[in-house]
Image: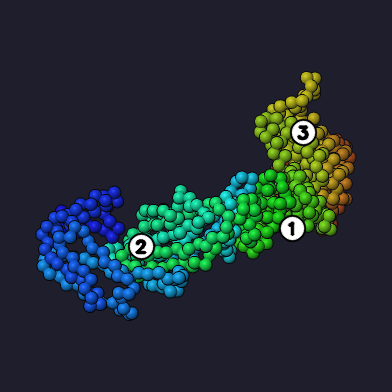
Protein backbone atom coordinates (compact mmCIF):
# COMPACT_ATOMS: atom_id res chain seq x y z
CA UNK A 1 0.00 0.00 0.00
CA UNK A 2 2.85 2.38 0.81
CA UNK A 3 4.39 1.74 -2.61
CA UNK A 4 1.04 2.36 -4.34
CA UNK A 5 0.49 5.67 -2.54
CA UNK A 6 4.02 6.82 -3.33
CA UNK A 7 3.61 5.88 -7.02
CA UNK A 8 0.28 7.72 -7.44
CA UNK A 9 1.61 11.02 -6.03
CA UNK A 10 1.40 13.99 -8.40
CA UNK A 11 3.65 17.03 -8.51
CA UNK A 12 1.28 18.96 -6.25
CA UNK A 13 0.10 16.03 -4.11
CA UNK A 14 -2.80 13.61 -4.44
CA UNK A 15 -6.25 14.05 -5.87
CA UNK A 16 -8.67 14.94 -4.49
CA UNK A 17 -6.86 17.61 -2.57
CA UNK A 18 -8.50 16.70 0.75
CA UNK A 19 -6.86 13.24 0.54
CA UNK A 20 -3.40 14.76 0.81
CA UNK A 21 -3.39 14.93 4.60
CA UNK A 22 -4.48 11.33 5.31
CA UNK A 23 -2.07 9.96 2.70
CA UNK A 24 0.90 11.85 4.13
CA UNK A 25 -0.05 10.75 7.66
CA UNK A 26 -0.22 7.13 6.55
CA UNK A 27 3.11 7.27 4.73
CA UNK A 28 4.92 9.00 7.59
CA UNK A 29 3.58 6.45 10.07
CA UNK A 30 4.75 3.62 7.86
CA UNK A 31 8.24 5.01 7.31
CA UNK A 32 8.58 5.99 10.98
CA UNK A 33 7.60 2.59 12.32
CA UNK A 34 7.32 -0.27 9.85
CA UNK A 35 10.25 0.66 7.63
CA UNK A 36 12.44 1.50 10.60
CA UNK A 37 11.89 -1.92 12.16
CA UNK A 38 13.53 -3.56 9.15
CA UNK A 39 16.41 -1.04 9.02
CA UNK A 40 19.72 -1.47 10.92
CA UNK A 41 22.32 1.07 10.00
CA UNK A 42 24.83 3.64 11.28
CA UNK A 43 25.62 6.90 9.50
CA UNK A 44 28.73 8.92 10.28
CA UNK A 45 28.89 12.57 9.21
CA UNK A 46 32.15 14.45 8.62
CA UNK A 47 32.38 18.15 7.60
CA UNK A 48 35.68 19.41 6.19
CA UNK A 49 37.50 16.41 7.75
CA UNK A 50 36.04 17.00 11.23
CA UNK A 51 33.57 14.43 12.70
CA UNK A 52 30.20 16.15 13.06
CA UNK A 53 27.85 13.43 14.34
CA UNK A 54 26.53 9.90 14.18
CA UNK A 55 22.96 8.80 13.28
CA UNK A 56 21.66 5.27 13.88
CA UNK A 57 18.43 3.51 12.93
CA UNK A 58 17.39 3.52 16.59
CA UNK A 59 17.05 7.35 16.64
CA UNK A 60 13.37 8.30 17.21
CA UNK A 61 13.45 11.12 14.64
CA UNK A 62 15.71 12.84 12.13
CA UNK A 63 18.72 14.81 13.33
CA UNK A 64 19.47 18.47 12.54
CA UNK A 65 23.11 19.53 12.73
CA UNK A 66 24.02 23.21 12.58
CA UNK A 67 27.47 24.71 11.98
CA UNK A 68 28.54 28.23 12.69
CA UNK A 69 30.64 30.51 10.53
CA UNK A 70 33.80 29.52 12.44
CA UNK A 71 33.41 25.86 11.61
CA UNK A 72 33.26 26.52 7.88
CA UNK A 73 36.14 27.41 5.63
CA UNK A 74 36.19 29.90 2.76
CA UNK A 75 35.08 28.57 -0.58
CA UNK A 76 33.57 25.14 -1.08
CA UNK A 77 32.62 22.89 1.84
CA UNK A 78 33.25 19.12 1.89
CA UNK A 79 30.70 16.80 3.50
CA UNK A 80 31.46 13.05 3.88
CA UNK A 81 28.75 10.54 4.78
CA UNK A 82 29.71 7.05 6.05
CA UNK A 83 26.91 4.43 5.87
CA UNK A 84 27.16 1.01 7.57
CA UNK A 85 24.33 -1.58 7.67
CA UNK A 86 21.06 -1.92 5.80
CA UNK A 87 18.28 0.62 5.29
CA UNK A 88 17.70 4.00 3.60
CA UNK A 89 18.62 7.50 4.64
CA UNK A 90 17.94 10.97 3.22
CA UNK A 91 19.63 14.26 3.89
CA UNK A 92 19.56 17.90 2.83
CA UNK A 93 22.23 20.56 3.10
CA UNK A 94 21.29 24.27 3.30
CA UNK A 95 23.69 27.18 3.34
CA UNK A 96 22.01 30.26 4.81
CA UNK A 97 22.96 33.64 6.22
CA UNK A 98 22.11 37.30 6.53
CA UNK A 99 23.00 40.31 4.46
CA UNK A 100 22.58 44.03 5.04
CA UNK A 101 20.25 44.57 2.06
CA UNK A 102 17.86 42.65 -0.10
CA UNK A 103 19.30 41.19 -3.25
CA UNK A 104 18.31 43.11 -6.36
CA UNK A 105 16.49 41.37 -9.20
CA UNK A 106 19.66 41.46 -11.30
CA UNK A 107 21.53 39.59 -8.61
CA UNK A 108 18.90 36.83 -8.58
CA UNK A 109 18.56 36.23 -12.30
CA UNK A 110 17.76 32.63 -13.21
CA UNK A 111 16.08 30.81 -16.06
CA UNK A 112 13.46 29.10 -13.94
CA UNK A 113 11.13 31.70 -12.45
CA UNK A 114 10.58 35.46 -12.76
CA UNK A 115 8.56 37.98 -10.71
CA UNK A 116 7.55 41.25 -12.32
CA UNK A 117 7.37 44.70 -10.77
CA UNK A 118 4.63 45.50 -8.28
CA UNK A 119 1.94 48.05 -9.09
CA UNK A 120 0.31 50.08 -6.32
CA UNK A 121 -2.83 51.79 -7.58
CA UNK A 122 -4.92 54.43 -5.83
CA UNK A 123 -8.58 53.68 -5.12
CA UNK A 124 -11.11 54.16 -7.96
CA UNK A 125 -12.59 57.62 -8.36
CA UNK A 126 -16.12 58.15 -7.11
CA UNK A 127 -19.05 60.25 -8.28
CA UNK A 128 -21.72 60.85 -5.64
CA UNK A 129 -20.89 57.62 -3.87
CA UNK A 130 -20.63 55.54 -7.05
CA UNK A 131 -17.33 54.03 -8.13
CA UNK A 132 -16.29 55.14 -11.62
CA UNK A 133 -14.95 52.44 -13.93
CA UNK A 134 -11.35 53.00 -14.99
CA UNK A 135 -9.45 51.58 -17.89
CA UNK A 136 -9.43 51.75 -21.69
CA UNK A 137 -12.62 49.93 -22.60
CA UNK A 138 -14.08 52.79 -24.69
CA UNK A 139 -10.89 53.17 -26.77
CA UNK A 140 -9.96 51.08 -29.80
CA UNK A 141 -6.38 52.43 -30.06
CA UNK A 142 -4.49 54.02 -27.19
CA UNK A 143 -1.19 54.30 -25.35
CA UNK A 144 -1.80 52.69 -21.98
CA UNK A 145 -0.59 54.18 -18.70
CA UNK A 146 -1.02 53.41 -15.00
CA UNK A 147 -1.45 55.77 -12.05
CA UNK A 148 0.86 54.92 -9.14
CA UNK A 149 -0.10 55.61 -5.52
CA UNK A 150 2.69 57.13 -3.41
CA UNK A 151 0.74 59.04 -0.78
CA UNK A 152 -2.71 58.10 0.50
CA UNK A 153 -4.76 59.38 3.45
CA UNK A 154 -5.85 57.16 6.35
CA UNK A 155 -8.85 55.05 5.41
CA UNK A 156 -7.83 54.70 1.77
CA UNK A 157 -7.86 51.30 0.12
CA UNK A 158 -5.03 50.74 -2.38
CA UNK A 159 -4.82 47.90 -4.90
CA UNK A 160 -1.69 45.77 -5.40
CA UNK A 161 -0.91 43.83 -8.58
CA UNK A 162 2.05 41.50 -9.02
CA UNK A 163 2.70 38.93 -11.74
CA UNK A 164 5.17 36.05 -12.05
CA UNK A 165 5.77 33.14 -14.39
CA UNK A 166 7.92 30.10 -15.11
CA UNK A 167 10.39 29.71 -17.96
CA UNK A 168 10.27 26.81 -20.41
CA UNK A 169 7.16 25.28 -18.91
CA UNK A 170 6.32 23.33 -22.06
CA UNK A 171 9.59 21.36 -21.92
CA UNK A 172 9.39 20.36 -18.25
CA UNK A 173 7.24 17.47 -17.08
CA UNK A 174 4.94 18.13 -14.12
CA UNK A 175 6.83 15.93 -11.60
CA UNK A 176 10.07 17.78 -12.41
CA UNK A 177 8.74 21.30 -11.94
CA UNK A 178 9.75 23.25 -8.86
CA UNK A 179 7.18 23.72 -6.10
CA UNK A 180 6.97 27.50 -5.77
CA UNK A 181 6.03 29.58 -2.76
CA UNK A 182 5.42 33.36 -2.82
CA UNK A 183 5.97 35.62 0.16
CA UNK A 184 4.42 39.10 0.21
CA UNK A 185 5.09 41.40 3.17
CA UNK A 186 2.38 43.92 4.12
CA UNK A 187 3.75 47.27 5.37
CA UNK A 188 3.21 48.00 9.06
CA UNK A 189 0.89 50.96 8.44
CA UNK A 190 -1.54 48.91 6.38
CA UNK A 191 -4.00 46.09 6.98
CA UNK A 192 -4.51 43.31 4.44
CA UNK A 193 -8.08 42.74 3.27
CA UNK A 194 -7.95 38.98 2.86
CA UNK A 195 -11.33 38.87 1.11
CA UNK A 196 -9.79 40.71 -1.85
CA UNK A 197 -7.07 38.14 -2.54
CA UNK A 198 -7.08 37.01 -6.16
CA UNK A 199 -4.79 34.60 -7.96
CA UNK A 200 -4.29 31.03 -9.11
CA UNK A 201 -2.69 29.82 -5.87
CA UNK A 202 -3.52 26.55 -4.09
CA UNK A 203 -3.66 27.91 -0.56
CA UNK A 204 -2.25 30.72 1.56
CA UNK A 205 -1.20 31.62 5.12
CA UNK A 206 -1.17 35.08 6.68
CA UNK A 207 0.69 35.75 9.89
CA UNK A 208 2.89 38.57 11.26
CA UNK A 209 2.13 40.81 8.25
CA UNK A 210 3.53 38.14 5.91
CA UNK A 211 1.34 36.62 3.24
CA UNK A 212 2.55 33.20 2.07
CA UNK A 213 0.97 31.72 -1.03
CA UNK A 214 1.53 28.15 -2.25
CA UNK A 215 1.43 27.66 -6.02
CA UNK A 216 2.87 24.15 -6.12
CA UNK A 217 4.02 22.71 -9.43
CA UNK A 218 1.41 24.49 -11.56
CA UNK A 219 2.54 25.22 -15.07
CA UNK A 220 1.12 28.74 -15.20
CA UNK A 221 1.52 30.77 -12.04
CA UNK A 222 -0.47 33.84 -13.11
CA UNK A 223 -0.17 36.58 -10.56
CA UNK A 224 -1.54 38.09 -7.39
CA UNK A 225 -3.98 40.91 -6.67
CA UNK A 226 -5.12 42.17 -3.30
CA UNK A 227 -6.12 45.33 -1.47
CA UNK A 228 -4.88 46.83 1.75
CA UNK A 229 -6.24 49.57 3.98
CA UNK A 230 -4.13 52.48 5.22
CA UNK A 231 -4.53 52.67 9.02
CA UNK A 232 -1.50 54.47 10.54
CA UNK A 233 0.08 57.74 9.31
CA UNK A 234 3.75 57.54 8.38
CA UNK A 235 6.08 56.52 5.59
CA UNK A 236 6.53 52.83 4.91
CA UNK A 237 8.79 50.77 2.72
CA UNK A 238 7.29 47.98 0.64
CA UNK A 239 9.56 44.91 0.90
CA UNK A 240 10.05 43.05 -2.37
CA UNK A 241 7.91 40.13 -3.41
CA UNK A 242 9.82 36.86 -3.08
CA UNK A 243 9.10 33.74 -5.11
CA UNK A 244 11.23 30.68 -4.38
CA UNK A 245 11.40 26.96 -4.86
CA UNK A 246 10.38 24.97 -1.80
CA UNK A 247 13.06 22.31 -2.33
CA UNK A 248 15.82 24.35 -3.96
CA UNK A 249 16.57 27.49 -1.94
CA UNK A 250 18.92 28.76 -4.62
CA UNK A 251 16.02 29.12 -7.08
CA UNK A 252 14.28 32.40 -6.22
CA UNK A 253 13.55 35.83 -7.61
CA UNK A 254 12.49 39.24 -6.26
CA UNK A 255 11.04 42.40 -7.69
CA UNK A 256 12.22 45.93 -6.93
CA UNK A 257 12.47 46.90 -3.26
CA UNK A 258 12.72 50.69 -3.63
CA UNK A 259 8.97 51.42 -3.35
CA UNK A 260 7.77 53.60 -0.51
CA UNK A 261 4.21 54.49 0.44
CA UNK A 262 3.25 57.38 2.70
CA UNK A 263 0.07 57.40 4.78
CA UNK A 264 -1.31 60.92 5.31
CA UNK A 265 -3.66 62.07 8.07
CA UNK A 266 -7.33 61.42 7.44
CA UNK A 267 -9.08 63.67 4.88
CA UNK A 268 -5.78 65.16 3.68
CA UNK A 269 -5.54 65.41 -0.09
CA UNK A 270 -2.91 63.28 -1.79
CA UNK A 271 -0.26 65.24 -3.77
CA UNK A 272 0.10 62.42 -6.33
CA UNK A 273 -0.51 63.27 -9.96
CA UNK A 274 -3.53 61.49 -11.41
CA UNK A 275 -4.32 61.12 -15.09
CA UNK A 276 -7.86 60.05 -15.89
CA UNK A 277 -8.28 57.06 -18.21
CA UNK A 278 -10.68 57.10 -21.20
CA UNK A 279 -13.28 55.11 -19.28
CA UNK A 280 -13.18 57.56 -16.38
CA UNK A 281 -13.52 60.60 -18.64
CA UNK A 282 -16.45 59.03 -20.47
CA UNK A 283 -18.20 57.95 -17.26
CA UNK A 284 -17.74 61.31 -15.56
CA UNK A 285 -19.00 63.10 -18.67
CA UNK A 286 -22.06 60.86 -18.81
CA UNK A 287 -22.84 61.25 -15.09
CA UNK A 288 -22.51 65.05 -15.26
CA UNK A 289 -24.65 65.14 -18.41
CA UNK A 290 -27.41 63.09 -16.81
CA UNK A 291 -27.40 65.41 -13.77
CA UNK A 292 -27.63 68.55 -15.91
CA UNK A 293 -24.11 69.81 -15.19
CA UNK A 294 -23.37 70.56 -18.85
CA UNK A 295 -20.21 72.63 -18.26
CA UNK A 296 -18.50 69.84 -16.30
CA UNK A 297 -19.75 67.22 -18.77
CA UNK A 298 -18.37 69.19 -21.73
CA UNK A 299 -15.00 69.52 -19.99
CA UNK A 300 -14.59 65.76 -19.50
CA UNK A 301 -15.88 64.82 -22.95
CA UNK A 302 -13.70 67.38 -24.73
CA UNK A 303 -10.67 66.02 -22.91
CA UNK A 304 -11.70 62.52 -24.00
CA UNK A 305 -11.91 63.50 -27.69
CA UNK A 306 -8.80 65.66 -27.72
CA UNK A 307 -6.47 63.21 -25.93
CA UNK A 308 -5.45 61.43 -29.14
CA UNK A 309 -7.20 58.11 -28.43
CA UNK A 310 -9.19 56.35 -31.15
CA UNK A 311 -12.56 55.62 -29.55
CA UNK A 312 -14.97 52.85 -30.39
CA UNK A 313 -17.92 53.86 -32.53
CA UNK A 314 -20.66 53.83 -29.89
CA UNK A 315 -18.90 55.88 -27.17
CA UNK A 316 -17.61 58.30 -29.83
CA UNK A 317 -21.10 58.92 -31.19
CA UNK A 318 -22.56 59.36 -27.70
CA UNK A 319 -19.75 61.71 -26.70
CA UNK A 320 -20.32 63.95 -29.72
CA UNK A 321 -24.08 63.85 -29.18
CA UNK A 322 -23.71 64.90 -25.54
CA UNK A 323 -21.23 67.63 -26.51
CA UNK A 324 -23.74 69.00 -29.02
CA UNK A 325 -26.41 69.13 -26.33
CA UNK A 326 -23.97 70.79 -23.90
CA UNK A 327 -23.13 73.41 -26.52
CA UNK A 328 -26.84 74.00 -27.13
CA UNK A 329 -27.46 74.46 -23.42
CA UNK A 330 -24.51 76.81 -22.92
CA UNK A 331 -25.05 78.77 -26.16
CA UNK A 332 -21.65 78.07 -27.73
CA UNK A 333 -22.46 78.64 -31.42
CA UNK A 334 -19.05 77.57 -32.74
CA UNK A 335 -19.22 74.30 -30.79
CA UNK A 336 -22.79 73.72 -31.96
CA UNK A 337 -21.75 74.00 -35.60
CA UNK A 338 -18.65 71.84 -35.07
CA UNK A 339 -20.38 68.92 -33.37
CA UNK A 340 -23.41 69.07 -35.66
CA UNK A 341 -21.12 68.77 -38.68
CA UNK A 342 -19.52 65.66 -37.16
CA UNK A 343 -22.87 64.03 -36.49
CA UNK A 344 -24.18 64.96 -39.94
CA UNK A 345 -21.18 63.41 -41.71
CA UNK A 346 -20.67 60.29 -39.60
CA UNK A 347 -24.10 59.53 -38.15
CA UNK A 348 -26.71 60.80 -40.57
CA UNK A 349 -29.32 58.43 -39.11
CA UNK A 350 -29.14 60.02 -35.66
CA UNK A 351 -32.42 61.77 -34.77
CA UNK A 352 -32.05 65.25 -33.27
CA UNK A 353 -35.11 66.76 -31.51
CA UNK A 354 -36.97 69.55 -33.30
CA UNK A 355 -36.12 72.30 -30.80
CA UNK A 356 -32.43 71.37 -30.94
CA UNK A 357 -32.22 71.34 -34.74
CA UNK A 358 -33.83 74.81 -34.84
CA UNK A 359 -31.17 76.03 -32.43
CA UNK A 360 -28.51 74.49 -34.72
CA UNK A 361 -29.86 76.52 -37.62
CA UNK A 362 -29.69 79.66 -35.48
CA UNK A 363 -26.06 78.83 -34.65
CA UNK A 364 -25.23 78.62 -38.36
CA UNK A 365 -26.85 82.01 -38.89
CA UNK A 366 -24.98 83.50 -35.91
CA UNK A 367 -21.65 82.31 -37.32
CA UNK A 368 -22.30 83.89 -40.73
CA UNK A 369 -23.42 80.75 -42.58
CA UNK A 370 -26.86 81.88 -43.72
CA UNK A 371 -27.14 79.39 -46.58
CA UNK A 372 -26.52 76.42 -44.30
CA UNK A 373 -29.05 77.81 -41.86
CA UNK A 374 -31.64 78.04 -44.64
CA UNK A 375 -30.94 74.45 -45.71
CA UNK A 376 -31.42 73.19 -42.16
CA UNK A 377 -34.63 75.17 -41.71
CA UNK A 378 -36.02 73.76 -44.95
CA UNK A 379 -34.96 70.19 -44.22
CA UNK A 380 -36.41 70.42 -40.73
CA UNK A 381 -39.72 71.73 -42.03
CA UNK A 382 -39.91 69.03 -44.70
CA UNK A 383 -39.07 66.28 -42.23
CA UNK A 384 -41.68 67.47 -39.74
CA UNK A 385 -44.25 67.90 -42.49
CA UNK A 386 -43.64 64.40 -43.86
CA UNK A 387 -43.97 62.90 -40.41
CA UNK A 388 -47.27 64.65 -39.72
CA UNK A 389 -48.78 63.79 -43.09
CA UNK A 390 -48.78 60.17 -41.95
CA UNK A 391 -51.77 61.09 -39.77
CA UNK A 392 -53.78 61.87 -42.90
CA UNK A 393 -52.92 58.47 -44.33
CA UNK A 394 -54.13 56.75 -41.16
CA UNK A 395 -57.41 58.67 -41.26
CA UNK A 396 -58.00 57.72 -44.89
CA UNK A 397 -57.22 54.07 -44.15
CA UNK A 398 -59.86 54.19 -41.41
CA UNK A 399 -62.50 55.27 -43.94
CA UNK A 400 -62.33 58.99 -43.11
CA UNK A 401 -61.10 60.22 -46.47
CA UNK A 402 -62.37 63.81 -46.20
CA UNK A 403 -61.08 64.20 -42.63
CA UNK A 404 -57.63 63.10 -43.80
CA UNK A 405 -57.86 65.50 -46.75
CA UNK A 406 -58.80 68.40 -44.45
CA UNK A 407 -55.87 67.54 -42.18
CA UNK A 408 -53.47 67.79 -45.12
CA UNK A 409 -54.89 71.18 -46.09
CA UNK A 410 -54.42 72.44 -42.52
CA UNK A 411 -50.82 71.25 -42.55
CA UNK A 412 -50.30 73.08 -45.84
CA UNK A 413 -51.49 76.30 -44.21
CA UNK A 414 -49.24 75.83 -41.15
CA UNK A 415 -45.96 75.02 -42.93
CA UNK A 416 -43.78 77.24 -45.12
CA UNK A 417 -43.98 76.87 -48.89
CA UNK A 418 -41.17 74.43 -49.48
CA UNK A 419 -41.21 72.24 -52.61
CA UNK A 420 -42.27 69.29 -50.47
CA UNK A 421 -45.26 71.19 -49.10
CA UNK A 422 -46.25 72.51 -52.55
CA UNK A 423 -46.10 69.06 -54.13
CA UNK A 424 -48.12 67.50 -51.32
CA UNK A 425 -50.85 70.16 -51.71
CA UNK A 426 -51.03 69.51 -55.46
CA UNK A 427 -51.08 65.74 -54.87
CA UNK A 428 -53.97 66.19 -52.42
CA UNK A 429 -55.97 67.98 -55.14
CA UNK A 430 -55.31 65.13 -57.56
CA UNK A 431 -56.38 62.50 -55.03
CA UNK A 432 -59.56 64.47 -54.39
CA UNK A 433 -60.12 64.69 -58.17
CA UNK A 434 -59.71 60.93 -58.58
CA UNK A 435 -62.19 60.22 -55.75
CA UNK A 436 -64.90 62.47 -57.19
CA UNK A 437 -66.40 59.60 -59.16
CA UNK A 438 -66.83 57.66 -55.89
CA UNK A 439 -68.61 60.49 -54.04
CA UNK A 440 -71.58 58.34 -53.07
CA UNK A 441 -69.29 55.87 -51.26
CA UNK A 442 -67.31 58.46 -49.26
CA UNK A 443 -68.19 59.01 -45.60
CA UNK A 444 -69.09 62.58 -44.59
CA UNK A 445 -66.75 64.67 -42.49
CA UNK A 446 -66.83 63.79 -38.82
CA UNK A 447 -67.31 67.47 -37.86
CA UNK A 448 -70.15 68.18 -40.34
CA UNK A 449 -73.51 69.30 -38.99
CA UNK A 450 -76.69 67.30 -39.49
CA UNK A 451 -78.04 69.62 -42.18
CA UNK A 452 -74.80 69.70 -44.19
CA UNK A 453 -75.08 69.29 -47.91
CA UNK A 454 -74.59 65.73 -49.16
CA UNK A 455 -71.29 64.76 -50.76
CA UNK A 456 -71.63 64.71 -54.52
CA UNK A 457 -69.31 64.51 -57.44
CA UNK A 458 -70.06 68.13 -58.30
CA UNK A 459 -69.16 69.36 -54.80
CA UNK A 460 -65.89 67.40 -54.81
CA UNK A 461 -65.03 68.74 -58.26
CA UNK A 462 -65.73 72.27 -57.07
CA UNK A 463 -63.40 71.76 -54.11
CA UNK A 464 -60.75 70.37 -56.46
CA UNK A 465 -61.06 73.46 -58.68
CA UNK A 466 -60.62 75.74 -55.67
CA UNK A 467 -57.43 73.91 -54.68
CA UNK A 468 -56.03 74.02 -58.21
CA UNK A 469 -56.90 77.72 -58.59
CA UNK A 470 -55.09 78.36 -55.31
CA UNK A 471 -52.07 76.36 -56.47
CA UNK A 472 -51.62 78.12 -59.84
CA UNK A 473 -52.15 81.48 -58.15
CA UNK A 474 -49.69 81.01 -55.29
CA UNK A 475 -47.08 78.97 -57.14
CA UNK A 476 -46.98 80.20 -60.79
CA UNK A 477 -43.26 79.37 -61.06
CA UNK A 478 -43.57 75.84 -59.69
CA UNK A 479 -42.32 73.06 -62.02
CA UNK A 480 -45.80 71.54 -61.81
CA UNK A 481 -47.73 74.76 -62.52
CA UNK A 482 -48.43 73.72 -66.14
CA UNK A 483 -49.60 70.30 -64.98
CA UNK A 484 -51.89 71.92 -62.42
CA UNK A 485 -53.31 74.22 -65.13
CA UNK A 486 -53.95 71.23 -67.38
CA UNK A 487 -55.76 69.41 -64.54
CA UNK A 488 -57.77 72.59 -63.91
CA UNK A 489 -58.90 72.69 -67.54
CA UNK A 490 -60.06 69.07 -67.29
CA UNK A 491 -61.91 69.81 -64.05
CA UNK A 492 -63.84 72.67 -65.68
CA UNK A 493 -64.61 70.41 -68.62
CA UNK A 494 -66.06 67.81 -66.24
CA UNK A 495 -68.36 70.52 -64.88
CA UNK A 496 -69.39 71.48 -68.47
CA UNK A 497 -68.01 75.00 -68.05
CA UNK A 498 -66.97 75.24 -71.71
CA UNK A 499 -66.31 78.95 -71.86
CA UNK A 500 -63.83 78.68 -68.99
CA UNK A 501 -62.19 75.72 -70.71
CA UNK A 502 -61.59 77.78 -73.86
CA UNK A 503 -60.21 80.69 -71.84
CA UNK A 504 -57.99 78.47 -69.71
CA UNK A 505 -56.54 76.64 -72.68
CA UNK A 506 -55.66 79.93 -74.35
CA UNK A 507 -53.99 81.06 -71.14
CA UNK A 508 -52.14 77.76 -70.74
CA UNK A 509 -50.82 77.94 -74.31
CA UNK A 510 -49.65 81.50 -73.76
CA UNK A 511 -48.01 80.97 -70.35
CA UNK A 512 -46.37 77.61 -70.99
CA UNK A 513 -45.34 77.44 -74.67
CA UNK A 514 -42.82 74.63 -73.99
CA UNK A 515 -45.03 72.48 -71.77
CA UNK A 516 -45.42 68.79 -72.51
CA UNK A 517 -49.16 69.19 -71.86
CA UNK A 518 -49.81 71.36 -74.95
CA UNK A 519 -50.63 68.61 -77.45
CA UNK A 520 -54.09 67.73 -76.05
CA UNK A 521 -55.16 71.39 -75.70
CA UNK A 522 -56.52 71.89 -79.30
CA UNK A 523 -58.77 68.90 -78.77
CA UNK A 524 -60.05 70.33 -75.51
CA UNK A 525 -60.69 73.67 -77.18
CA UNK A 526 -62.47 72.00 -80.09
CA UNK A 527 -64.68 69.95 -77.81
CA UNK A 528 -65.53 72.91 -75.58
CA UNK A 529 -66.16 75.28 -78.48
CA UNK A 530 -68.34 72.89 -80.46
CA UNK A 531 -70.36 71.84 -77.44
CA UNK A 532 -70.93 75.39 -76.12
CA UNK A 533 -71.90 76.69 -79.61
CA UNK A 534 -74.13 73.74 -80.40
CA UNK A 535 -72.22 73.34 -83.68
CA UNK A 536 -73.98 76.50 -85.01
CA UNK A 537 -70.75 78.25 -85.91
CA UNK A 538 -67.62 76.99 -87.59
CA UNK A 539 -64.69 76.19 -85.35
CA UNK A 540 -61.14 77.01 -86.39
CA UNK A 541 -58.16 74.90 -85.33
CA UNK A 542 -55.73 77.16 -83.45
CA UNK A 543 -52.42 77.07 -85.31
CA UNK A 544 -50.13 78.09 -82.45
CA UNK A 545 -47.23 75.69 -82.98
CA UNK A 546 -46.02 75.84 -86.59
CA UNK A 547 -43.21 73.37 -85.94
CA UNK A 548 -45.05 70.93 -83.63
CA UNK A 549 -46.61 67.77 -85.03
CA UNK A 550 -50.29 67.21 -84.76
CA UNK A 551 -51.56 65.34 -81.70
CA UNK A 552 -50.98 61.64 -81.78
CA UNK A 553 -52.63 58.86 -79.91
CA UNK A 554 -50.08 59.27 -77.15
CA UNK A 555 -51.44 62.72 -76.35
CA UNK A 556 -54.81 61.27 -75.45
CA UNK A 557 -53.65 59.45 -72.37
CA UNK A 558 -53.32 61.08 -68.98
CA UNK A 559 -49.61 61.73 -68.25
CA UNK A 560 -48.34 60.55 -64.86
CA UNK A 561 -47.06 63.01 -62.26
CA UNK A 562 -43.30 63.30 -62.09
CA UNK A 563 -43.07 65.54 -59.04
CA UNK A 564 -43.55 62.86 -56.42
CA UNK A 565 -47.31 63.12 -55.82
CA UNK A 566 -49.10 59.93 -54.79
CA UNK A 567 -51.53 59.94 -57.74
CA UNK A 568 -51.59 60.62 -61.47
CA UNK A 569 -53.23 63.65 -63.04
CA UNK A 570 -56.71 62.73 -64.23
CA UNK A 571 -56.62 63.46 -67.99
CA UNK A 572 -59.88 64.42 -69.55
CA UNK A 573 -59.07 62.53 -72.76
CA UNK A 574 -57.92 59.27 -71.18
CA UNK A 575 -60.80 57.50 -72.98
CA UNK A 576 -62.40 59.34 -75.91
CA UNK A 577 -65.67 57.48 -75.38
CA UNK A 578 -66.29 59.37 -72.14
CA UNK A 579 -67.64 62.33 -74.14
CA UNK A 580 -70.35 62.53 -76.80
CA UNK A 581 -69.32 60.96 -80.10
CA UNK A 582 -70.87 63.79 -82.12
CA UNK A 583 -68.36 66.59 -81.42
CA UNK A 584 -65.44 64.17 -81.72
CA UNK A 585 -66.69 63.05 -85.13
CA UNK A 586 -66.97 66.65 -86.16
CA UNK A 587 -63.38 67.30 -85.06
CA UNK A 588 -62.11 64.29 -86.99
CA UNK A 589 -63.88 65.44 -90.17
Q: Which residue is mark 2?
A: 180
Question: In the visual, does 248 lie left or right of 139?
Answer: left
Q: Position of residue 237 (x, y in %)?
A: 52, 62
Residue 518 visible? The answer is no
Asked whether the beta carbons under mark 2 and mark 3 sit within 8 Å of each other, the answer is no
Question: In the visual, does 90 lie left or right of 404?
Answer: left
Q: Earlier in the sequence, mark 1 or mark 2?
A: 2
Q: At 34% from the left edge and 65% from the top edge, which residue is drawn?
A: 245
Q: At 87% from the left edge and 43% from the top edge, which residue is drawn?
A: 473
Q: Which residue is mark 3?
A: 406
Asked whether the beta carbons under mark 1 and mark 3 sit within 8 Å of each other, the answer is no
Q: Position of residue 361 (x, y in %)?
A: 79, 51
Q: Which residue is mark 1?
A: 338
- Residues 554 and 24: in front is 24
Question: In the visual, does 248 lie left or right of 321?
Answer: left
- Front of the two marks 1 and 2: 2
Amino acid sequence: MASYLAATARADGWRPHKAKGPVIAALTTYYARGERERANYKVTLTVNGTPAGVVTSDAPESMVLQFGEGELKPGKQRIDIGFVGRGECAFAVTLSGFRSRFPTPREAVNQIVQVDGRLVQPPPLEYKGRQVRRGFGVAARYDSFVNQARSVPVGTVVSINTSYWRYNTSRIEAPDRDYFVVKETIPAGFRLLTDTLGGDYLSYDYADNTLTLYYGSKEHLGGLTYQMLAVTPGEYRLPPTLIRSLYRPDVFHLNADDQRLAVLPRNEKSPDDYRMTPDELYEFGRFNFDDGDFIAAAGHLKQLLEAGWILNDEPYRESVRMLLTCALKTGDNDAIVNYFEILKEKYADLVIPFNEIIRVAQAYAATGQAERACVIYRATADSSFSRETAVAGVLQQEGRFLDGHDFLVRLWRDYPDTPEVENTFFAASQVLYSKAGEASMINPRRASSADARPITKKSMMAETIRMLETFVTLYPESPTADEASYSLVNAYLDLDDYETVVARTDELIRLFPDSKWLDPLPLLQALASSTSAGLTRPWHWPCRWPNRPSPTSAAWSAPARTSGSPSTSPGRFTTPSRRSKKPLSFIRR
